Amino acid sequence: MFKDLDPLLHSQLRLSVMSLLIGVESAEFSYLLKQTNASRGNLSVQLNKLKDAGYISIEKSFRNNYPLTTCKITSEGIKAFEKYVENLSEYINRRKD
Amino acid sequence: MENNFNEKESLKLIHEMIENSKAGFGKSSFFFLLWGWLVLFASLMHFALLFTEFKYPFLPWSITMILGGIVAGIKGSRMKKQRKVKTYLDTTVSYLWASFGITLFIILFSAGMGKISWKMSNILIIALYGFGTFASGGIIKFKPLIFGGIFTWIIAVASLFIPSEYTLLSIAFSVVVAYLIPGYMLKSKEKLNNHV
C-alpha cells in the first residue's frame, strides 16, 4: 500500500524527528525527547538511523561538563522529507478520486 | 508495529510536529523594556541637566549604556544556554540587532568626531530605533512593534524641525512608542504564548 513511501521516514518517531527538524536550524536531543515523548534509548537509535542515511547530522559537544547532542537536518534530508510528503499527498489524492 | 500507521496519521503527525516547533515569541520583550527604560531615563536626565551648571550633562548616557550592555549581555548568554532549539528566526533577529548596534556605534562615533551635529545624530538614532522595531515586528509578526516603528520614523522626521536640545525629548518620546508600549504588549503576549 505504501510502496512509494520512504521506509526510513514512514516510522512515527523518525517522521516526528524529521518534521521537527525541518522547521528549525538545529535542535538539542532533550528538545526532541520532550517533543516526541519517546524514550531516550529509542530516540537515540532512530537518530542514528537517520544519521546513517545522511538525513540529519549529529554534533556531540559539552556544555557545563554535560554531553550535548545537537541535531540538524541535511539538504539530503530535506529532499527526502519533501519527497515523502509529495508521495503521501499523491497517495491521498488517488484515494479521493 | 511502528510502521503500521496510515497516511492520515502520518499527515497529522507531520502537522503536529511542525506546529510544535514553530517559533514562539521567545523573551525578546525583556530587551525592549530594558533599553526602553534606560534610554528614557538617560534622555530625560540629559535634557534636565542642560538647564543646570553641571559640566557633563551627557553623563547619564555613559552610565545607563554600560549598565544596559552588561545586563543585556548576561541575560542574552543565559537565554542562549537555556535554549534547546535554534530557529531561523533566532538567527535573523540576532543579526538584525547586531547590525543595529554597529550602525548606532557609527552614528555616535561620527557625532563624537564632530562630523555630524548631535541633533542629526539624535535624529538618525531615532530613525534607527524605528528600523529595529519595525523590522523586529515584521519578523515575529507582531503589529504593535510594526506600528511603533512607523510612528518612530514620523517622530524622526518631525524632529528635523525642532531646536537641537529638544531632540532629546524626541528620543524619550520615541522609546516610549517604539520600545516601552510595544514591549509591554509583547510581554503579555509572551506570557500567554509560553504557557500554552
Image: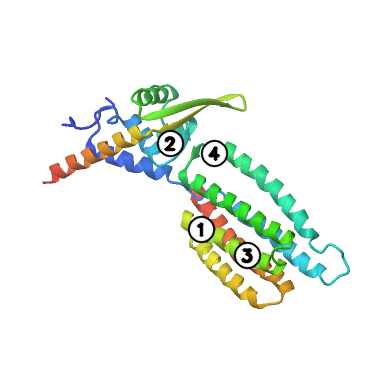
> x, y (%) of residue B162?
68, 77
Q: Mark 2 or mark 4, which is nearer to you?
A: 4
Q: Which residue is mark 3?
A: B124
Q: Residues within 10 Å of mark 3 (few under 14, many from 20)?
A: some
**Distance of mark 2 from mark 3, alpha carbons?**
45 Å
Dot 2 falls on a residue whose secondary structure is helix
Task: Tell if the residue under mark 3 belongs to the same chain as the one under mark 4.
Answer: yes
Mark 1 vs mark 4: give the one in front: 1
Give the vertical position of A61 relative to B24 (above or below).
above
According to the picture, the residue beneath numbered tag 2 turns out to be A35
Distance from disc 1 to disc 4, alpha carbons, whole Å, reads 23 Å
Q: Residues within 10 Å of mark 2 (few under 14, many from 20)?
A: some
Q: Amino acid at mark 2?
A: Gln
Q: Nearer the viewer, mark 1 or mark 2?
A: 1
Q: Relative to residue B170, is residue A37 drawn left or right?
A: left
- Which numbered dot is residue B135? 1
Distance between mark 2 and mark 4 Cα atoms: 14 Å
Label 1 residue SS? helix
Q: For residue A61, what is the image quadrant?
A: top right
Q: Which of B53/B188 is in front?
A: B53
The reply to whether callout 2 and callout 3 are in contact (CB within 8 Å) is no
Instruction: Please state the chain letter of the residue tagged with numbered disc 1 in the rendered image.
Output: B
Of residues B163 and A55, the one drawn nearer to the viewer in this rendering: B163
Pinpoint residue A7: horizontal percent, then vertical percent.
Answer: 25, 27
Same subunit, tags 1 and 2: no
- The residue identified by callout 4 is B83
Pointer 1 local density, CA inside 10 Å: few below 14, some 14–19, many at least 20: some
Do tags 2 and 4 sit on the same chain? no
Relative to B101, is A6 above or below? Answer: above
- Please say if the residues under marks 1 and 2 sit with CB atoms less than 8 Å apart: no
Callouts 2 and 3 on one subunit = no
Q: For the residues carrying marks 2 and 3, which lies nearer the camera in this image?
A: 3
